[in-house]
Image (tube, rainbow, N blue to C red):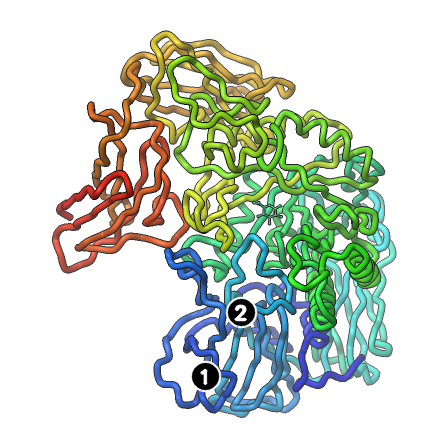
Amino acid sequence: MKKINFKNRCALFVVYSLFGFGVLQAQNTTDLVRTKTNLNADWQYVANDTKKITDIAQIANWTQLNLPHTWNSEDATDAEPGYRRSASWYKKNLAIPTIDKNKVYQLYFEGANITTKVYVNGSEVGEHVGGYIGFTFDITKFIKAGNNEILVRVDNSYNIEIIPSQKSDFFIYGGITRDVWLLSMAKNHIEKIKITTPKVAAKSAALVVKTFVENPQGNTYSAQLKNPEGKVVATQKGMLSGSETAIKFNDIKNPELWDIESPNLYTISVSMLEKGKIIDKIEDKVGFRWFEFKENGPFYLNGKRVLIRGTHRHEEHAGVGAAVSNEQHRKDMESIKEMGANFVRLAHYPQDPEIYKACDELGLLVWDELPWCRGGVGNQVWKTNAKNLLSEMIKQNYNHPSIIIWSLGNEMNWLPDFPDGDNTEKMTTFLKELNSLSHQLDPSRKTAIRKYEEGARIVDVFSPSIWSGWYSGSYKSYKKAVDKYKQDYKHFIHAEYGGDSQVGRHSENPITGEGQIKVEGWEEAIVQGKGANIAQIGDWSESYIVDLFNWHLHISENDPMFVGNIQWAFKDFGTPLRPEDDIPYMNQKGLVDRNGNPKDAYYVFKSYWSEKPFAYIESHTWTERQGPKDLARVLNVFSNCPKVEFFHNGVSLGEKQRDLKAYPACGLTWNVNFSEGKNTFVAVGTTKDGKKVTDTIDVNYRFTKNGPAVGLVLSSKKMKNGNYLVTALAVDKNNLRCLDYEERVYFQCLSGGQTLKNQGTPTGSESIKMSNGKAAIEVIPDTKSDSIEMTILNQNFKGEYLKFKK
Ligand code: GCB
């Protein structure tokens, strides 16, 4: 094994030293031979870009905080253009009561964006270039018993030599955005274990555990494999040879396979012994599974056809940016699984270790992605950085059975950062290098890219760009696109489809699958598009997005030869490229808002994909509607029950059988003649075994169309969390809510509290476009005053004020 010079950049060291920690969780662990101590608590922070550690010694104005942390958690999404792209320093006192001379001590960062330099007791111990991936520094020779000062300089300055490109549609949050750990282990220890399953079949599987020890000195090993129930099913003992020992289990009988329904995980542990005494031990999980992308489709997992039902995940959440807690990481993945997805593309970069662990445990197949997102090919330094990141990603995440694809990039040639960076020859040459590197590091998985057509035949699996009904055409052209690409590409998968939607915005007549707006007579046509680019001309209603997704699923779920598709994106996320969106700086293509609350579209997916019985009437956020008297409206129920009965004001409108082949809502649609005033709807689903699930909504309906908006009206309501929800309605001269009013409004809290702003959520932004004449914001009361004063205005309305008692 290569000797590491820790003074130098640590990319190489990182990948070797991180293996084998996959099984350790975000909590302190200790056994006789290794310890892993979480260092997230009690850091000091200062936003100062000096490079000199001597300057830092003079600084007095440190702020106390815990990790994970980003300095862009709010400034990315605030009203001011831009976000802080600079360096900051973090400081921590690391108390080590006694130092064991027979041990090594390492600092393990799960990830920091985007260049990180670490100092211990005034000496530089290493630098890591690139975000989104872990790195480790050996600090043994820098520490002493007692207090040790750790200083970390993290820098997310604009730097075109490090992927991803600035032109990517997401923020590059600066900071130590993931957990930090102190590791200690014997001087002579196992560097990593690398798990491969060269043969897996229903009757028997083989497992090879490559064990890397720098200096085996005649040590022996003892390896133990436990089945998912914790029973030891195989053991191996032997001599550790050279730096790499292949520990083989050749015939594991009737392996309990890892798959999307039963993600069975075995546990492998490898102990290293000196004269019969254990001096080191590593544990990790093993999943036995095999997969295949058949030529021109479909996809097989463990010999069975599986339709890939995927979504995308960005590492992001309201209020915290990329500094997401482990609980939240886990919640995201659970929510994706609950929707019924079986696949997740980690867009557009490797993610927190908690994510891979969750995918292994929940049974979600993973497309892991190198952050080569947009920006073309760069100079030599850029190339070295990109290659380092690819090998770090593969080496660190290698043991996770959920991963099946290493993606080398996304729309990489677009918007080059370097002159001639999109040159096809340069692009394909570099892509080929990455592709071989990936295969060399891991021959067992597939490589992939999205959109860069010229590279389609270089990688194993390719996704072209198809945005039917959003960036082009109408959603009903989706099948044509799928059928064409199934022929064009040997291994075709479709990543990214969808569109933006603003929570609570609904349309009686959304643009149709043919790209047209239906004209009923008296309603205003919001847009008269020909369906060329709905992203620009559309109304961003939930109604349209429900139809669009419904159609996509109608196609994919009924195509036995299709590999499958991956919806864009699971959660709304922040981006510097969209300052003028309905919620500023938000890409609103999420199935859930930036807080994780489902939009209507979430239930469309759930109705096709999930097993757990439910019924959802479209829509719980569409409770005010209008239309001409006696004009029937179609109401959809999204449900996975084989039968659903629908009631209007206590009267049954009939029971319907769910039919996968029918569109929309698998035939669970009813024509309804609304009554004026309150209408109560109940959907009762009957499950396969006769159980009932129900859903209820109340809708206020009127036969009078609102006139033009003449003002805004504010009201307030106390929330369960103690905050107040201040709601604004646009009204006409008869005080009717203007359901067609979608202008931007601006909230402000004048006294008595603070608005919950910069969250990128429907109730957490001071600037927001109205949904059917409504917008709201949460207000956090202060403790001093007994009332709160709010205002709202926009260019049409010069200010509405509300003062209310707490
Ligand atoms: C894409 C990109 C993704 C964007 C998305 C969008 O094609 O790959 O990064 O965020 O479209 O929302 O436009």
Above or below — where is 806 with respect to 382? Answer: above
Above or below — where is 623 with respect to 306? Answer: above
Across and down, in percent, residue 268 comes to 72, 62
Whether residues under marks 1 and 2 lie with C-beta atoms below 8 angstroms apart, the answer is: no
The kind of residue on which mark 1 rests is: Asn
The quadrant holding residue 743 is top left
Q: Check disc 1: other Cα within 10 Å, few if <14, some if 14-19, many if 20+.
A: some
Going 21% across and 54% down the picture, which residue do you hit?
A: 781
Residue 438 visible in the displayed image: no
Q: Which mark is residue 93?
A: 1
Across and down, in percent, residue 358 comes to 59, 53
Going 37% across and 75% down the picture, which residue do you hit?
A: 64
The residue carrying mark 2 is 156
The quadrant holding residue 430 is bottom right
Q: Secondary structure at mark 1?
A: strand
Q: Check disc 2: other Cα within 10 Å, few if <14, some if 14-19, many if 20+.
A: many
Which residue reaches farthest front?
419
Going 24% across and 46% down the picture, which residue do you hit?
A: 724
Q: Nearer the viewer, residue 528 or 18?
A: 528
Across and down, in percent, residue 58 comes to 40, 90
Tell me the CA gap for discs 1 and 2: 24 Å
The kind of residue on which mark 2 rests is: Asn
- The mark nearer the N terminus, 1 or 2, is 1
Q: Secondary structure at mark 2?
A: loop
- Left or right: 640 with respect to 192? left
